[in-house]
Amino acid sequence: MKLIAKALVCTAAVAAFAAHAEGPYVGGSIGSARYKGPDIGGLNTDRSATGGKLYGGYGFTPNLAVEAGYADVGKAESAAGSVRGHGVFVDLVGTVPIANNFSALGRVGAFNGRTSVSGGASDSGTNAKFGLGVQYDFSKQTALRGEWERYKFKAFGESGDADLYSVGLNYKF
């Protein structure tokens, strides 16, 4: 009986979300990434690089969506070699209107990242990811986003972070 009750509650919740669904969207952004953390493989990782992301999402309500995508937080070069970070993510994204066509957004999720150093060594793992940003809606379909996101890495027995400051476009279907 409990299983039937849980199934009914879940079905009602899905139906409620579908009734207020905002629908699918895609987007991409580019910006500056900065690695922070201990040196990896003898390479200084406190460096800046160009990064970006491509993603798709689905808005369940005007204020709640889920996004999944690929992020490349760049390649940092030094005299000793290079280190590169990239991976896939899934986030829960919340938006709050703050002015006409302007919204604040926050995100929290999981990031399956891969760290590679010159010479071919690489390591991967799944860690937390979070961020904040603002969004300006040009129309019901297109929007401009500015975001800060922190991608957590754990590679080669060390933990580090990559901050991505980016600007990008969204398109809702």
Image (cartoon, rainbow, N blue to C red):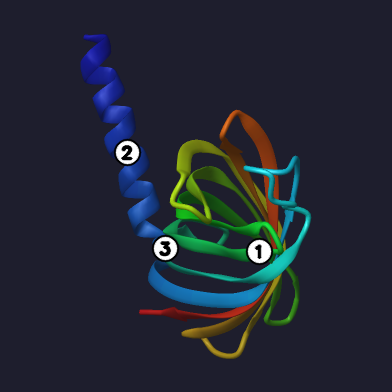
Q: Is residue 106 above or below residue 139?
A: above
Q: Which residue is mark 3?
A: 57
Q: Which residue is mark 2?
A: 12
Position of 134 with respect to 129 (left or right) is right
How far apart, in angstroms, are the residues tagged by discs 1 and 3? 29 Å
- Three-letter amino acid code at disc 2? Ala
Q: Is residue 147 visible?
A: no
Image position, residue 32 (x, y; %): 70, 72
Q: Earlier in the sequence, mark 1 or mark 3?
A: 3
Image position, residue 154 (x, y; %): 59, 36
Residue at the spot 52% in from the left edge and 64% down from the top edge:
72
- The crowding category of the residue bearing disc 2, from other C-alpha atoms within 10 Å (few below 14, some 14 to 19, many at least 20), is few
Image position, residue 121 (x, y; %): 46, 45
Q: Is residue 58 above or below residue 114?
A: below
Q: Which residue is mark 1?
A: 76
Position of 3 with respect to 111 (left or right) is left
Nearest the viewer among 122 and 69 is: 122
Numbered marks: total: 3
Residue reaching furthest to the top: 1
- The crowding category of the residue bearing disc 1, from other C-alpha atoms within 10 Å (few below 14, some 14 to 19, many at least 20), is many
Nearest the viewer among 44 and 152 is: 44
Residue at the spot 45% in from the left edge and 53% down from the top edge:
87
Q: Secondary structure at mark 2?
A: helix
Q: Is residue 102 above or below residue 113?
A: below
Residue at the spot 60% in from the left edge and 77% down from the top edge:
30
Q: Nearer the viewer, mark 2 or mark 1?
A: 1
- Three-letter amino acid code at disc 1? Ala
Nearest the viewer among 55 and 153 is: 153
| The C terminus - image quarter | bottom left
Q: Secondary structure at mark 1?
A: strand
